[in-house]
Structure formats: structure tokens, C-alpha cells
Image (cartoon, rainbow, N blue to C red):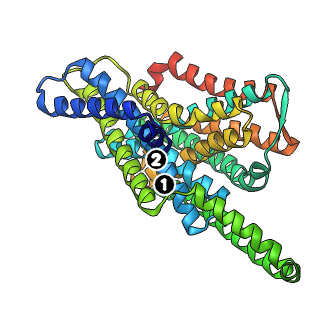
Amino acid sequence: MNFLKQFKKTFHISFWEAIIALAVITVFFILRYCLEQIPLPLVILGFIVGTWLAFRPSEWAVEGLNSSAKYVGLSEYVAGIFSSLASNLPEAVIAIMLLLKGQELIAVITVLSAAGFNTLILGFAILVATWKKWEIKVPADLEKKESPLIRWAIVALLMTTVFAIIEYIHALNSEIFVLSDAQLTKPVASLLALSYVIYLVFIIGRKDVKKDKLSVSDDIEQQENNETIEKNDTKSHSQEHEKRLSKPMTILMLLMGFTGIFFGGEALTWCVEELMHGTTSIELSPIAIALILGAAGAVPEHGIAIVSAINHDIDVALGNSIGGILQSSLLIFGVLGMIISITLHPFIVLQLAAIAGVLWFVKRCIHDGKFDTFEAVMIILIQVLIFVILFEDISIFE
């Protein structure tokens, strides 16, 4: 009984869930490579397996990164950023694999639709948190540390949208309009990704500078209270040691996490290929498939934001969802644009503009020092509007 409890505490799943999952995953991969004619139920099973592998192992990767950050000595906030990046790994892996398979449109829309689903999650998280109180205060970390990146993201995404419109005008002025003529160039995309990398360096560097200043200005006070500090440091070190995993377990969590995410992305990519070109191909729009993949990557992992809001942990709720939006729209989208020149599909342009609009809402909330129920509803409606436009005018996007 102690083994079962310890197993669940370590891996965040029950022992029986692990056994069932391992059996189902094994059966799926055996049937996938043994059957010549792939039936539709096997493809559906592949989506279930891929979603589970994108969800559970990302928790292990986050756990491993958190523990690694404690060993390296990173602050909790910086560790949280890297954990959020690990949460977005499934979307990135799926998108890169789709690119390698030649599915450019599905890859890009998968990433941006994941940002769209994160937008819905952000709105619902704020709505849940403000349902009875009508408003909540903006968390300090969001105001001080995320605000500069949010301002930059608004400007960058709006400029990218304007760039797309100019590309459309240029293509329309040609003798024959071809959508592929309107492209996001690699230098522009690289700047989006670079901006997030600079942000990470800024956050880490700023923390270090702050520590240096405090160590110089408070030197005398620290000497006078040396004994008290030693006791507190010992207690803090003891608590930190209890929270972090052992080094072998940290490495195991990282290996299991990243391996699971890889095979999850590979399974979902295979399902997409089978639906579009295999023996089970059905009448399903590439964008519809991309939306399914975006939801599979974003909703299970970032759904924790809504759970956190219900439990009144609004810092985690907002940080998780806003972090997911910024990472998808700047870093992952930018990296994809560095690999290939992205065709500026109308949905891509609409989603970029919608993200900029949502971030503007968030920026105004930060300026006001609060989020309220009305703003939560507006954030939800912005993203719902984009999805409605997508499905109402689906012929435009083919």
C-alpha cells in the first residue's frame, strides 16, 4: 500500500493508470506497424494515446525542470517560466513533426490555435476568479515582470498583421492572386522568437543584478544579524531540499517527460497523416484537424489554470495561461517561421490580431490594477468570434 501511495506521489498518476496506459500504448504501436489497412478506431485510439502522452509526460518534464532549477539556483519565478515552456513542448513537437511531414498549414495553425485555446482558458480563469467578487487584483509578478513583454507582443503582433495586409495588397496587384505569395519572411519571424529569448535573458539577468545590489547595500545589517540569517538559511535550505527531487530522479523525470512528449507528438502526427492521406481518410478540413491538435496540446495542460482559479490560486492561473499565449505566439510561431517561410493564411492573420487584442485587454487590466468579470467575458468573446469567423467562412480558408 505504501508503494502505491509513493508511486502516485512521485509520478502524479496511480499505479493502475500507469499499467493501463502502458498496455494501451503498447497495443497501439504494435497494431500501427502490423496492420496494412488502418481502421478508423485505431486512428481514434492514436489520438487518445497521443493526447495522454502530450499531457502526462509534460507534467514529469515540468517536475524535472523545477527540480533542476533548484539545483542550479534559479529563482522560483524563472523556474516557473521554464516550467511553462515545458508545458508548451507538446505543441512545439507536434508542429515541428508536421513541418517535417510537409504539413505547413496544419503545423502553424496548430500552434496559433493552441494560443487561441489558451486565450479562452485565460478568460474562463478570470471569470471563475471574479464570479462572486466581481474583480480581483493583478498579481505583482504579472505587473512587474510580464508587463514589458506584453507591451512588446502587442506591438509586434500588430506590426505582423499590418505586414500581412501589405503582402495581401501586393499579391492582389499581381496578375494572378496566389495566397502563397503572401509570406512571413524568416527575418521577421526570427525577431519574434528572438524577442522572447531576450526577455528570458532580461528576467534572469535582472534577478542577478537585484541580488548583487542587495548584497552590497545590506552588508552591515547582514553582519549584525548573522546568527538569525544562518538559522533562516538552514531552515530554508532544508525546506528547499525537501521539495526538490534527488539527482537520479530529476534525470529520470526529464528523460521520461521528453521521451513521452516526443512519442505523443509522433502519434498525433501519424493520426493526421492517416486522416488526410491514409486508408481512413475522411472529409475533414486541414484547419479542423489543426484545431483538434491545438486543443489536444493546450487544453489538458493549461486547463490547470481554471482549476487554480477555482482554488483561488490566481497567480498560477494567470501566469500559466498568459505564459502559454506569449510562448505560442512569439517563441514557437517565430521558430516555425525561421524553419520555413510561413504563408500568411487568413486565419493566421486573424488569430495574430486577436491575440494582440487580448493582450491589449490584459495590459489595460494591469494598468487599472484589477481584472473584472466584464473583461473576462470580452476576452472569451474575442476568441469565440475568431473561431466563429473561421467556421462560418470556411471556404475562404481552403
Can you tell which quarter of the image residue 121 is in? top right
Quarter occupied by the C terminus: top left
User: Is 74 left, or right, of 209 in this rendering?
Assistant: left
User: What's under tag 2, amino acid-wise?
Assistant: Trp
Residue 183 lies, with reference to residue 217, above or below; the image says above
Check residue 287 in the rendering and tell me which mark sits there, or answer none: none
In percent of width and height, residue 243 lies at 59, 55
Q: Secondary structure at mark 2?
A: helix
Quarter occupied by the N terminus: top left
User: What's under tag 1, amino acid-wise?
Assistant: Gly
Q: Nearer the viewer, residue 124 or 238?
A: 238
Q: In this view, which residue lies farthest toward the front?
A: 1
Inter-mark Cα distance, 2 to 1: 6 Å
The residue under the point 64% across, 48% down is 159
Question: Does residue 343 appear anywhere in the picture?
Answer: no
Residue 390 lies, with reference to residue 324, above or below; the image says above
Q: Secondary structure at mark 1?
A: helix
Name the residue carrying label 2: 60
For the residue carrying disc 2, how many other residues have a C-alpha within 10 Å: few (<14), some (14-19), or many (20+)?
Answer: many
Looking at the image, do the residues carrying marks 2 and 1 touch, with CB atoms under 8 Å apart?
Answer: yes
The residue under the point 59% across, 34% down is 304
In percent of width and height, residue 90 lies at 43, 42
Name the residue carrying label 1: 64
The residue under the point 46% across, 50% down is 61
Question: Does residue 106 appear anywhere in the picture?
Answer: yes
